[in-house]
Amino acid sequence: MVRQRKRKFQIVLISLAVLIPLSVAALFYWGTPEPPDIELGKARTAIAEAKKVIAPDFIPPAFNEAVILYDSAMHFWKVENERFILKRNYSNARTLAIRAEQLALLSPKIAIQNSEEFLAAINRDIEAIKKDTAQIELLYSRLPLPTTINKKYSTGLMLLKEAEINLEQKNYKTCRIKLETAKSNLSDVARHTSSLLSDYFSNLGTWKRWADQTIRESAQNQSHAIIVDKFAGKCYLYLGGKLKTTFEAELGKNWIGEKRYSGDKATPEGKYRITKKKEGHSTKYHKAMLINYPNDEDKQRFQEAVRNRELPRYAKIGGMIEIHGGGGKGINWTDGCVALENSQMDVLYRQVGVGCPVTIVGSLQPLINVIKGPKP
Amino acid sequence: MKIKLLSGIAIVGLALVFTGCQKYPQAEVDAANAAIEATKAVQANLYVPEEFNALQDSLTAVLGAVEKEKSKLFHNYKDEVAKLTWTAEQAKVVAANAQAKKEQYKQETAALLVELTTLMDQNKEMLAKAPKGKEGKAALEAIATDLTGIETGVAEVNNKLASDDIINALNQAKALKEKATSINTELSEVMAKVKGKR
């Protein structure tokens, strides 16, 4: 009896020893929640692939959100892994991972669209700046501009080049910054140039009247007359009211505008006459013809400027303005005179005498024609 | 006898359970993270972006694998530890590559600056001789301003080099060289014409 009971006890014990571990194993096997590794793996792959396609400067918010969601999913996964295995719940991590994958898959499309729009805008801007620059360039080399403006122009062109280099290297943010700065510099130059020219060309009516009077006088007297067009850099010789010869002329360094005082390196504008002819040892510029600057109008304007304190009291009006040789340098370099190449000076010198009218004007053409015209 | 056998089986089972539950490889994870941070410190993301991204992706993948292992009843981090160790080693390679690239850019910039100095010396010399021989309409003052601008740019490049902004320094040096070369060409043509006339 006792033996039978002992045997029964042994059977129960063995059964429990087998069943309990089996039950526990079954519980762990079927009760352990499935980890979100597949969802996170997909999200990770999508993010990695998107990263390959998206340029750093075009990362859309959707991509950043995908990364944040992925990190959050990983965080929740870790938190759940710290809990007792049967109590873990990965649904939060799984949901976040799925959303991260969706956003990561969407990001390249958004980034490509953004980059295409950005690149189109950048290229449009570069083209526009180049077009504006070409316009400035057309006039730039001829205009005496202040050093600050020259510097802005030079810096603007350099920045434009840097922007193009950065664009080639896909450094889009830097490209945009350089381009904006280039644009700002070159716009300042364009604004200054445009304002300078429109102010200057407001005298066009007067210049045309002077030129017409000079040509009429030449026609009436069947005599020679000289007209200097400063903007065109030309010296025209008329005979009997008809244009006979055109010479290339070089002017004062600050040729734009009227001559106001001695040493301003400006070429005067007005109606003058030749008062003296010089050659040999009497001039260092091959041959020269002195004009009667300052005339009465120049003197009156100068006195007014001194009276109005636009010029200092010690300022002098200057003089010794000539048409002389020594030109052909390709730049405006004189102290206010009109310089011709020696061979051209010979021609002019031979044909005109003392008393010949010399009319110096800013331009004979309206500004629009000057801008549209070919670079002289 | 049977009880002894069952006890033996239970002990072996428990031993298997404990040997199967490896410790979370925190030290290796920290080492790999630190190695990635070290690559960031040498701006690997700027100088070798593709290698850097690949490295980051591989670490992210390993960390996912570690967490997956941790989710199991019995953990075995052997493979993950190996991958983490490899990532940390690879990070050193990437950091070295970044530094090499940075050095290469520095040297390219330095070489460009040397070329620029030569070009600028030539330009200044030609500019000094040009006034009487320079033909065409380009104003010499504008060229002089350009040269001043280039000199200012060179100073900026040096400042960028000093502040470790190497890529921008290199790009600016390239733009400056291009500008200096175009001025050099322009002035050389003028000087050639002047010589031809004599």
Image (cartoon, rainbow, N blue to C red):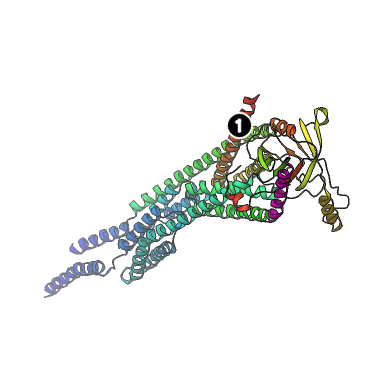
Residue range corresponding to the magenta coloring:
A202-222
- Above or below residue B177? Residue A297 is below
The quadrant of the rendering that contains the C terminus of chain B is top right
| Quarter of the rendering containing residue B64 | bottom left
Direction from residue A247 to residue A323 in the image, left or right: right
Q: Is residue B130 left or right of residue A68?
A: right
Chain letter for mark 1, please: B
Q: Which residue matches tag 1?
A: B188
The kind of secondary structure the magenta stretch mainly shows is: helix
Q: Residue furthest right?
A: A314
Quadrant of the rendering where the N terminus of chain B is positioned: bottom left
Residue drawn where x is 39% and y is 51% of the image? B84
Q: Nearer the viewer, residue A79 or A103?
A: A103
In the picture as drawn, the residue positioned furthest to the top comes out as B198
Density class for disc 1 (Cα within 10 Å; few <14, some 14-19, many ≥20) is: some
For mark 1, give the secondary structure.
helix
Residue A373 in view of the camera:
yes
